[in-house]
Amino acid sequence: MVKSLENTAKQILDSNYQEKGFTIPCKGLYPFQWKWDSGFIAIGYAHYDTDKAKSEIKTLLDAQWSNGFLPHIIFHNESDTYFPGPEFYQINLNPYATKKYKTTGLTQPPVTGFVLEKMYEIVEDKSDMLDFIKSIIDKVYLNHLYFYQNRDPKNEGLVYIYHNWESGTDNSPIWDEIWDTMDSPNYEFERRDTDHVDASQRPTNIEYNNYLYLVDIAKKCHYDDEKIAESSPFLVQDPLFNAMLIKSNEALINLYKIIGGNEDKIQQLEKWQNKSIKSFNDKLYDEELEAYIHYDMKNEKAIKLITSSSFTPLFAKIPSKQRAEKLINTLVTKFGKSDMYLCASFDPTSEKYNPKKYWRGPVWININWILYYGLHNYVYKELADRLKNDTFELIKKVGFFEYFDARKSEYTKNITGYGGANFSWSAALYIDLIKN
Ligand code: DGY
């Protein structure tokens, strides 16, 4: 059984792999290369096809802008199954934009650093992988430099995102209050996502108006971060995003140490690291909720809601032992009732919880994977095992979907998973988890 699921996972990755050397997240719904997807996908490949793992990262980094920015989608090919496409983004407005590829002007969580470290840990031929890492690691460093120089206007060690699509948690209830402050125009557009997935599982049209408006504002700023920080109504310090950056800082330090030399870069990364971890704990932890939260820089207020992102700092060893204990208690009491699979993407005790709608409630495999390793960092082995077994059970029951209902009772009915089927990162991270 386990073997055949592993084979299915590999088949999914291989069939989503494209001739140009990257892997689509899933057919129809996401027909290009996505930044954080590529990272998780490379981890899966590292277990059985290192050439593909390397090529996944190489194609991603090849689209880097000259200021270090890494775009969230690389439109390697034409496709009429996705909206909004490259013509909407017009990245040529920005002087640093790549001329080689069509891309968006948004980014996604900075996972690439820790992905490289994981790839190095997984493969047998360390020296071959180290040669590869040597050839590209400075690009990842440059990406971190970009973040600290351009996305941290108050010099806090915490970087902002200016779009919900940058968070990766696209339609989370976290953003709802920000949408209320905006008066987005009614765009005329033809959505393509709802051709592939039931609309009840996707964001609403009103939300899409906001999403498009934020891109339009960024375009008016020619994708200049300073101008965006002044004029965008959406400016958020996101715990998931910053935790991924911190974890990747640590990975770059470790890798540079293995490579040797590079003292200046190691020192700089350590400086960022100390400052970021301190600010993260000072600013993004809510004593009352006993959880990490998002901070709305535009309206200068903490967003007091708990999501699965609230627990991801465990992965980057951000909380102290004592704080981790409280955080994990919040995780268990709110998200871990015995009739629920871990880990819902949004607080199941909140009235904003929606068990079917994308990032408003369903379980996501990449977050489970992050939490699994996060719990291990603090030696919560039993809970980590539960998280892994829940992940396996969901996949066993319905297959490698994009996201899953967290309510166990639903699976006595004839339900499937949600969103796209044969989803690459669900397959890739399953492969990593079973090897663990
Ligand atoms: C989408 O189109 O839903 C993507 O998540 C944007 O990156």
Image: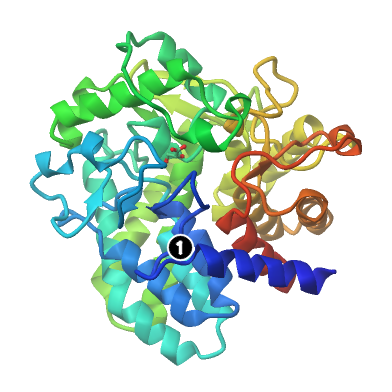
Point 30% across, 57% down: residue: 76
- Element carrying mark 1: loop
Q: Say left or right for 226 vs 60.
A: left
Compared with residue 49, is residue 400 higher up or lower down, i.e. above or below? above
Work out whether 264 lies above or below 313: below
Residue 229 in which image quadrant: top left
Quarter of the image with the N terminus is: bottom right
Against 85, is 140 above or below? below
Q: Position of residue 88 (x, y in %)?
A: 24, 34
x and y, in percent, of residue 260 in the image: 34, 84
**Could you tell whether 104 is left or right of 276 in the image?**
left
- Toward the viewer: 175 or 35? 35
Please rate how many residues cluster around mark 1, counting C-alpha atoms within 10 Å: few if below 14, some from 14 to 19, many from 20.
Answer: many
- Foreground pick, 339 / 159: 339
The count of marks equals 1
Answer above or below: position of 120 versus 139.
below
Query: Which quadrant of the figure has residue 5?
Result: bottom right
Name the residue rendered at 68%, 29% in the picture: 356
Residue at x 41% of width, y 61% of height = 112
Q: Residue furthest left?
A: 95
Compare residues 332 and 325 and report the one nearer the observer. 332
Image quadrant of ligand 1 equals: top left
Q: Which residue is mark 1?
A: 23
Q: Please state if 218 lies on the left or on the right of 196 as rendered.
A: left
